[in-house]
Amino acid sequence: MRIKKDDTVQVITGKDKGKRGKVLKAMPKIHKIIVEGVNVQTKHAKQTRKAPSEIKHQEGPIDVSNVMYYDGKAKAPTRIGYRFEDGKKIRISKKTGEAID
């Protein structure tokens, strides 16, 4: 999976198409990510002795194939490639060719 935590991504398909946000959590085993402000779901919490009942809005997971890395320099979504420099594997932007990390 080429998308990592703290990357800025843009949604390319689905109900939130066009939205941008920061990746809060990456789950590579199930190929999903949680993006800030995208796929917001409503959760109802029952009343307990300590806390009142409430309605929470939280982000749900989306498939990583529905997002693209957002390159701030190119100001557009781009694909990610890899290159070896000094024996290290680094991520690069396909649009600009510059290193991401």
Image (spheres, rainbow, N blue to C red):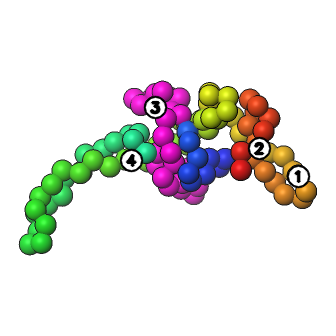
Q: Residues within 10 Å of mark 3 (few under 14, many from 20)?
A: some
The residue carrying mark 2 is: 99
Query: For numbered disc 1, what is the local secondary structure?
Result: strand
Query: Do residues under tags 1 and 2 come within 8 Å of each other at their CB atoms?
Result: yes
Q: Earlier in the sequence, mark 2 or mark 4?
A: 4
Q: Which residues are magenta?
A: 10-35
- Which residue position is annotated with label 1? 85
**Callout 4: helix, strand or loop?**
loop
Q: CA distance from mark 4 to mark 3?
A: 14 Å
- Label 2 to label 4: alpha-carbon separation: 30 Å
The kind of residue tagged 1 is: Glu
Confirm or deny contact between disc 1 and disc 3 (CB under 8 A). Answer: no
Residue 20 locus on image (x, y percent): 49, 35
* Comes first in the chain, label 2 or label 3: 3
Amino acid type, residue under disc 3 in the picture: Lys
Task: Give how far apart the Cα atoms at labels 4 and 1 are.
Answer: 36 Å
Kindly identify which residue carries mark 4. 60
Residue 75, how many percent across, how many down?
62, 28
Closer to the chain start, of discs 1 and 3, is 3
For label 3, the residue is: 19
Q: Is residue 95 magenta?
A: no
Which mark is first along the chain, 1 or 4? 4
Few, some or many residues within 10 Å of mark 1 (<14, 14–19, 20+): few
Q: Which amino acid does the dot numbered 2 rest on?
A: Ala
Q: Residue furthest bottom?
A: 49
Q: How many marks?
A: 4
